Image (tube, coloured by chain):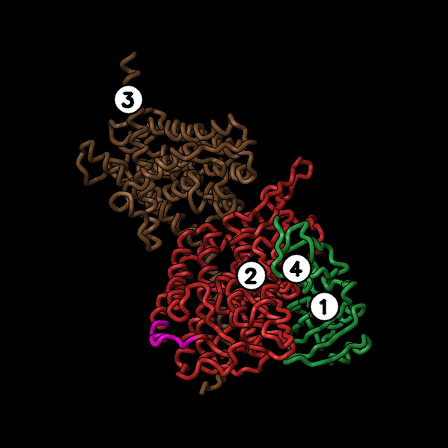
């Protein structure tokens, strides 16, 4: 494991340039500020890049442009109100976020969530994973310069969001999960709607492979770019598809099954090189698995209650709990300290994008300027979650 | 004397007007083509099927405020659009659209074209340097490297074409294709010419010097309004130049076995062929991601330039030994296919194999027993 | 196993809802962290979460650890006095603690000694106060 001395003003000197550079040449490092308005930083992320020609010498990420103090805000809100705040963390995978905070409170209160609610949750979370990965597929191809996939991806995302709207009443900020279940039952034609929307989704995933995954130019751009090995990735706290691309088979759905994942049959695709292409490929395969999981859930789902008998205002007992779940971006954790009141005493979020972003610096050693964009894109960060 | 001057003025004016009209049509065509590829409608509001959208865009650009950065090198900043624009128009003086339909038909027409098209690089670098913007500098330097390297395969391919009719006159070259278009004789030449041409005008997959996800417009980042419109115009004129040259040099221009000899038929023939080539270029744009600078350079120097020499050598052997046309066509086709297969074998094939292996591995890990839900 | 490994560091064991919680002295943290990571039976190679909790009389820094190989997890706690919130940084053990520690410094004013760069991460340079603390007023905001 070769780690950079993190944090200190690291100069990635002593990197082995593949071509001999004439040191007699009078060359100057160019400092370039990328972001926060750069089109390829996926939000308000800013990094200062020092380049020597086209090679990156050093990179310094700056975050916090979207810091809203969510953790502090949570201390002042009742549990049911916190759910809306979580919608706004990872605004691409809202259901997954809502789920974790509900899971934390339920764990603390010992609430048993009815089976139908669990199925609805699982289906929505997996659909949201597809929607989120679709966004990744589109924007990553856009970063690479291919402008067509983003249109295809957004069309599928749109279908999924229409279903979310039919279920929860909102396309983006759903506020649908409740502590002890879900807010309302799924619409009558839920299963039928999903079955119809999954067909084009499957077609688009297959199309992604034909269009971009095995495209020569795309392979040239992503193969062996931004590699990170498994041990380093774990040490840096990388999680989710980005970690699995490095060959570490860590998926919370598999290792600590929550919801109904222990009843579902799915595989965990892993890469081996940990380069940008692996991270892309793992996500495309995960979409396929999510489709299969949703289909299994639809087969198993039965009618029943959707809400556990809970009090209107949740008051978890004094104590603390750490709940975590597999978000589309990685391992989202919530550390909840309750004092027995109707508001949490302290709520700490472990946002996967935040931790994944830390490893960016490591991946960018010896990269080209154009690779920096690809590496950042392959981590699939959402700034709402990084900055909280 | 005066009469000549007036005639030339009218001719040049007509040329510029015609090219502007072509650019407007190209902009519309590109937006519609990309929209079709992406399963959307494209512009639909201004005019029937958005036909007037490019006009509206041009008007918007002309009335926009022209911003000059405070630190910009003003003479360079002002001159750069002209330096890019003028060569790309000057080329058109010698491009014929029919046997006797050119502003000036020069004996050294192709030489003139190749010589002038290189000049616009200077303008792009000037724009990059004059903007006082780091992204612009980066983009300008990228463009210099890229355009100069891709000039070589173009020249080599053009030389191979010149060898067939023994002339640099475009009219003679087209007339030489009465029997058989050079695309059939030199498919390799056509492929190299198209690829290098796309790189020369900086379109996807070779658009690294104004890649919007990396350098955000590169040399043109600080330009707005009319100045930017001039760059835009030049880019589309260049695209069309490459397409028309491909039509003239390889696709037989106005000479086509089954067409009548009238001038207007020839004119239409060239236009149709050129627009077909343009559609192919737009198709690239809708499909490919862009390459990285080092890959772009190595593709130019390690693939295209050697191939263009092979193409040159094949043509030379064909002429020297007086071989049959079939032998040249087949040899050229074989080299093209071999290169395409090599690229596939080196890039896509291993990736597909790895993907299969990994999926098999992941499936092997799958839990066997599934708890019954009920 | 945990108690064996950490025996000489005088840990206090307790059980939270679904996991073991071990509290160690702050001087023993780095030693404990190294042991936890390197002991082959424990091999906690993955720092899931690093949280700072303000209990108004003390700070608690909580390390949620997980071993990917052994698939077990637990929480390590260190208690800090309110007026002297200093703790050694675990960045040398788990490099992933980097931004978590900077955030803890940013929002709570906990000083992670040995961290190479504790500059503001989420807040801007020159922000006054520690907005994560309970004492920081809720509706206060600063113009920037």
* Distance CA(mark 2)–CA(mark 3): 63 Å
* Distance CA(mark 3)–CA(mark 1): 86 Å
Q: Earlier in the sequence, mark 1 or mark 4?
A: 1
Asked whether, in this view, residue B240 is left or right of residue A244, the answer is left
Q: Is residue C70 visible?
A: no
Q: Disc 1 marks which residue?
A: C56
Give the letter of the chain under mark 3: B
Q: Chain C's shade in the image?
A: green
Nearer to us of marks 1 and 2 is 1
Query: Within the magenta stretch, is there residue B293?
Result: no
The reply to whether callout 4 and callout 3 are in contact (CB within 8 Å) is no
Q: Disc 2 marks which residue?
A: A385
Percent coordinates x, y for residue B103 in the rendering: 29, 25
Q: Of residues B201 and A116, which is closer to you in this image?
A: A116
Q: Chain A's shade in the image?
A: red
Q: Disc 3 marks which residue?
A: B10
| Magenta span | A184-194
């Amino acid at each position: 494991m070769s780690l950079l001395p993190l944090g200190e003003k690291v100069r990635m000197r002593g990197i082995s340039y593949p071509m001999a550079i004439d040191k007699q040449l009078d060359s100057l490092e160019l400092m370039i500020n990328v972001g926060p308005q750069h089109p390829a930083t996926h939000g308000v992320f800013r990094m200062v890049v020092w380049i020597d020609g086209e090679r990156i010498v050093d990179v310094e990420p700056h975050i916090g442009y979207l810091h809203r103090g969510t953790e502090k805000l949570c201390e002042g809100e009742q549990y049911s109100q916190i759910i809306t705040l979580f919608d706004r963390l990872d605004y691409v995978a809202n259901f997954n976020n809502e789920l974790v905070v509900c899971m934390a409170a339920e764990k603390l209160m010992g609430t048993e969530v009815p089976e139908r609610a669990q199925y609805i949750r699982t289906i929505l979370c997996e659909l949201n994973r597809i929607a989120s990965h679709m966004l990744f597929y589109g924007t990553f191809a856009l970063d690479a310069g291919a402008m067509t996939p983003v249109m295809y991806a957004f069309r599928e995302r749109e279908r999924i969001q229409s279903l979310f709207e039919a279920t929860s009443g909102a396309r983006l900020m759903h506020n649908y999960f409740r502590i002890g279940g879900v807010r309302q039952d799924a619409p009558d034609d839920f299963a039928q709607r999903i079955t119809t929307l999954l067909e084009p989704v499957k077609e688009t995933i297959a199309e992604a492979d034909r269009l971009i995954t095995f495209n020569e130019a795309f392979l040239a751009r992503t193969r062996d770019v931004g590699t990170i090995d498994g041990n380093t990735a774990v040490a840096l706290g990388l999680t989710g598809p980005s970690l699995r691309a490095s060959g570490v088979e860590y998926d919370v759905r598999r290792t600590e099954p929550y919801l109904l994942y222990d009843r579902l049959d799915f595989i965990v695709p892993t890469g081996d090189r940990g380069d940008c292409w692996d991270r892309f490929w793992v996500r495309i395969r995960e979409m396929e698995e999510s489709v299969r999981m949703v289909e299994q859930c639809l087969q198993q789902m039965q009618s029943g209650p959707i809400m556990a008998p809970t009090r209107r205002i949740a008051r978890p007992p004094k104590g603390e709990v750490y709940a975590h779940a597999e978000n589309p971006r990685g391992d989202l954790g919530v550390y909840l300290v309750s004092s027995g009141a109707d508001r949490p005493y302290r709520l700490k979020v472990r946002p996967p994008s935040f931790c994944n972003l830390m490893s960016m610096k490591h991946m960018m050693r010896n990269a080209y300027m154009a690779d920096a964009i690809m590496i950042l894109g392959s981590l699939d960060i959402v700034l709402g979650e990084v900055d909280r | 004397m005066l009469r000549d001057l007036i005639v030339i003025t009218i001719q040049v004016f007509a040329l510029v007007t015609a090219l502007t009209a072509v650019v407007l049509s190209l902009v519309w065509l590109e937006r519609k083509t990309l929209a079709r590829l992406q399963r959307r409608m494209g512009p639909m509001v201004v005019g029937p099927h958005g036909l007037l959208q490019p006009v509206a865009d041009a008007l918007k650009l002309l009335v926009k405020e022209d911003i000059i950065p405070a630190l910009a090198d003003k003479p360079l900043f002002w001159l750069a659009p002209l330096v890019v624009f003028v060569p790309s128009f000057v080329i058109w003086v010698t491009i014929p659209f029919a046997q006797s339909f050119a502003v000036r038909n020069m004996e050294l027409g192709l030489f003139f074209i190749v010589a002038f098209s290189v000049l616009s690089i200077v303008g792009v670098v000037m724009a990059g340097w004059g903007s006082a913007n780091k992204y612009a500098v980066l983009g300008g330097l990228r463009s210099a490297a890229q355009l100069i390297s891709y000039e070589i395969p173009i020249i080599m391919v053009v030389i191979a074409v010149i060898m067939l009719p023994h002339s640099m006159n475009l009219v003679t070259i087209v007339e030489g294709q009465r029997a058989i278009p050079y695309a059939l004789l030199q498919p390799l030449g056509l492929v190299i010419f198209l690829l290098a041409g796309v790189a020369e005008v900086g379109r996807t997959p070779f658009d690294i010097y104004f890649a919007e996800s990396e350098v955000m417009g590169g040399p043109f980042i600080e330009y707005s309004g009319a100045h930017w419109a001039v760059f835009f115009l030049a880019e589309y004129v260049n695209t069309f130049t490459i397409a028309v040259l491909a039509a003239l040099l390889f696709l037989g221009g106005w000479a086509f076995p089954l067409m009548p000899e009238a001038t207007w038929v020839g004119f239409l023939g060239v236009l149709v062929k050129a627009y077909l080539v343009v559609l192919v270029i737009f198709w690239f744009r809708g499909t490919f991601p862009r390459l990285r600078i080092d890959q772009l350079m190595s593709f130019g120097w390690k693939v295209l330039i050697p191939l263009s020499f092979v193409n040159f050598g094949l043509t030379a052997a064909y002429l020297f030994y007086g071989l049959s046309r079939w032998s040249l066509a087949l040899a050229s086709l074989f080299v093209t296919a071999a290169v395409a297969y090599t690229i596939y074998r080196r890039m896509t094939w291993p990736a597909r194999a790895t993907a299969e292996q990994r999926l098999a591995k992941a499936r092997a890990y799958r839990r066997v027993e599934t708890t019954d839900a009920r | 196993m945990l108690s064996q490994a950490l025996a000489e560091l005088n840990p206090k064991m307790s059980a939270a809802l679904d996991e073991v919680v071990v509290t160690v002295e702050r001087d023993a943290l780095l030693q404990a962290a190294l042991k936890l990571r390197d002991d082959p039976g424990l091999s906690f190679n993955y720092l899931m979460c690093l949280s700072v909790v303000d209990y108004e009389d003390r700070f608690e820094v909580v390390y949620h650890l997980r071993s990917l190989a052994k698939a077990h997890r637990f929480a390590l706690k260190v208690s800090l006095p309110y007026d002297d919130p200093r703790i050694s940084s675990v960045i040398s053990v788990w490099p992933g603690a980097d931004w978590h520690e900077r955030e803890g410094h940013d929002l709570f004013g906990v000083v992670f000694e040995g961290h190479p760069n504790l500059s503001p991460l989420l807040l801007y340079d020159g922000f006054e106060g520690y907005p994560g603390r309970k004492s920081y007023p809720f509706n206060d905001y600063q113009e920037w």
